[in-house]
Image (tube, rainbow, N blue to C red):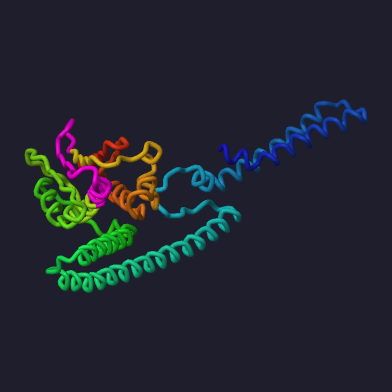
Amino acid sequence: MKIFLKSHFILLLAVMTQGVFTWSYFWFIGFHAWGHVIYSIFIQLLFILGYLTYCWIEDYKLYHWIQSSDDTTRLIPSFGTSYFSKRLHERIIKEKEKADRKIVESEAEIKERVTFMNQWVHQMKTPISVIHLMIQDQDDPLFQDMRKELFKLEEGLKTVLYSSRLSMFGKDYHIESFPIAPFLKELIKENKRLFFQFNVYPHLKETEERSILSDKKWLKFAIEQILSNAVKYSTKKANRVDLKVEEVDHRVLLTITDYGVGIPEQDVRRVCDPYFTGVNGRKYHESTGMGLYLAKEILGKLDHKMTITSEVNKGTTVCIDLSK
């Protein structure tokens, strides 16, 4: 009703102005038979109210749809029987069909790009593996440097792969129940080259067995990004990173604590922004600013909350609520 009255405000104002003009006109010409004046104004109001009532009945569905906040469906209902409502409904249907076609085309294009990216990443893994085999028995410092660069390349390819898949997350995840301790031990084992390279080693505090509901593949990548940051920014300052799983108020929490350089206070709120490198990223290591962003995005899609606390020169703690 509010929208209806606002849309017809000018009409109501015009009718009132006309009524005042009619009354003034008869007053100035000396016609004081007020019964006739009031009667004519009353008939005029009666007609305009009848017209507005007709408009309201005809376009009720339109005004109801405009005011509705229900966005659970993209169905466009019939707006009414008036000419304006019918033409508006036809135009919206046409625009919706255009938008739907563009959405389908965009999804197909994204899927094609993700497929291409996946294939490209897997193709790049083959020469990297070959290079690893070629230098595995070489202890010369030159080959040690090559291993470090190969590790960076592998990490970059993995980041590209998962960032491209993120847009298709809804079609690429599987929630299951699994024990968290063996999962973390396997994750640590698979990333042993990271720990050896930076001479920073993980310490998983033994806790009683607990199971969580999540997607192993995506959760593993998210934790790897957090661990990678913890290890890199602990180099030459500390040689350990602590991982602890505990139950607090019926919530399963995974805490990853490093004792490295810490994050400046002004950067803590922004470290999860895409491409944000901050003071540490520019000062200590080459950083893409995508690791923590991807970790937070993935954990959010898995309904796992991530919080970060840090103090300069004392270290950083990342807490992941694995409850669901």
The reply to whether residue 323 is in sight is no
Between residue 176 and residue 218, name the one nearer to us.
218
Residue 180 located left or right of residue 167? left
Name which residue lies at 52% across and 58% down: 92
Quarter of the image for residue 84 reads bottom right
Seen in the picture, residue 258 relative to 133 is either above or below; the reply is above
Quarter of the image for residue 86 reads bottom right
Seen in the picture, residue 275 relative to 117 is either above or below; the reply is above
Between residue 60 and residue 306, name the one nearer to us.
306
Name which residue lies at 24% across and 43% down: 237
Q: Residue furthest front?
A: 140
Residue 75 located left or right of residue 83? left
Quarter placement of the C terminus: top left
The picture places residue 161, in percent across and down from the top left corner, at 29, 63
Name which residue lies at 41% across and 65% down: 106
Quarter of the image for residue 194 reads bottom left
The picture places residue 83, in percent across and down from the top left corner, at 60, 56
Residue 141 located left or right of residue 186? right
Name which residue lies at 58% across and 43% down: 56
Seen in the picture, residue 167 relative to 322 is either above or below; the reply is below
Asked if the stretch drawn in magenta spans residue 249, the answer is yes
Quarter placement of the N terminus: top right
The picture places residue 152, in percent across and down from the top left corner, at 27, 61
Asked if the stretch drawn in magenta spans residue 102, the answer is no
Between residue 160 and residue 60, name the one nearer to us.
160
Q: Which residues are magenta?
A: 225-252
